[in-house]
Image (cartoon, rainbow, N blue to C red):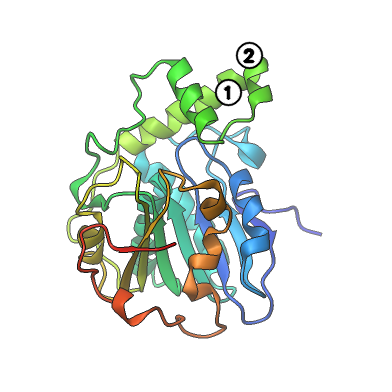
Amino acid sequence: MSAPDTTAVRLKESADGAPTLVCLGFCGGGTATFHDWIPSLPDGAGLVAVCYPGREGRFAEEYARTWDELAADAAAGVASVAGEGPYVLFGHSMGGWMAFEVAVRLAATGAPAPRALVVSACNAPDRGVTERDRFLSQGQRDEELLGWMLTHGLLPEHVLEEPELTEMAVELMRADLVARDSFAPVPGARTDVPLQVFSGDADPVIGEDAGPRWAALTDGPFRHDVLPGGHFYTPGVWRTLPSRIPFLTTATGPAPAPAAALSVPAGPRGTAAP
């Protein structure tokens, strides 16, 4: 029996012909946050979470110190499962930029393309890292970073009682922030797969032009869904987010989205969803 893959972590196997949701995480995150999504997956859909270096099963590896290094690693992880069947590529926050870059990199190599690209809680990457995108910064004190993680449910309270664990959490977050801040957009980078954008109606990170700017980066169908809550939406929305991805519901071809959502929404923040 081969050893489990520590990069493309299989959280749920897909049924024959059903798509797999392949997830790329946010700054300071790992694969654990995606475990709670299993109950909300459509029937038959699978779930894979890509683990970045320096955490979980890859704890002994060095952190990626540049965006290019992290993107190359993530692209290799996605490529390892891309040929197994249909998949939807998802990324949240920093992971949204990573998902877009991985899709572009895979297209350049001729690897199987995702059925759709779904990005969540991130501005379009065409302007690079702006001050708005630095809502978490390298200059913040450890206590501030820990407080943000705790507020957003990314850090169990018991971790704060263990100095070694809190030190590891901060070190991991800072390593990801260093990689994020080295990001530079590739001129002309775009995709031709269907693109779905999620954003929170109370997320201060997201600019008013996020929807139109993302729409300009794909030649495929586009939809922008504005959801209740902040950077991680409301707990109920976050827990059931896969149920809002229509591309996971059929065995072949992208699932149809509402007609009004296939074009750039009239409002700058997209189409509100309950």
| Residue identified by numbered label 2 | 163
- Residue 125: tell me if it is visible: yes
Tell me how many marks there are: 2
Relative placement, left or right, of 63 versus 46 is left
* Residue 111 in picture, x, y percent from top left: 44, 71
Judge by depth and name the residue closer to the eye, 184 or 130: 130
| Residue identified by numbered label 1 | 168
| Mark 1 residue crowding within 10 angstroms, few (<14) / some (14–19) / many (20+) | few
Question: Label 1 is placed on what type of residue?
Answer: Met
| Mark 2 residue crowding within 10 angstroms, few (<14) / some (14–19) / many (20+) | few
Residue at (57% x, 42% y) in the render:
30
* Residue 73 in picture, x, y percent from top left: 47, 49
Question: Label 2 is placed on what type of residue?
Answer: Pro
Task: Note whether 267 is above or below 52 in the view shown.
Answer: below
The reply to whether the C-beta atoms of the residues labelled 1 and 2 are less than 8 Å apart is no
Relative placement, left or right, of 18 versus 76 is right
* Residue 93 in picture, x, y percent from top left: 40, 46
Q: Which callout, 1 or 2, points to the residue nearer the camera?
A: 2
Task: Note whether 171 is above or below 176 in the view shown.
Answer: above
Residue at (17% x, 56% y) in the render:
187
Query: Where the N terminus falls, by quadrant?
Result: bottom right
Callout 2: SS: helix
Task: Note whether 139 is above or below 102 in the view shown.
Answer: above
Relative placement, left or right, of 86 versus 5 is left
Judge by depth and name the residue closer to the eye, 102 or 34: 34
Callout 1: SS: helix
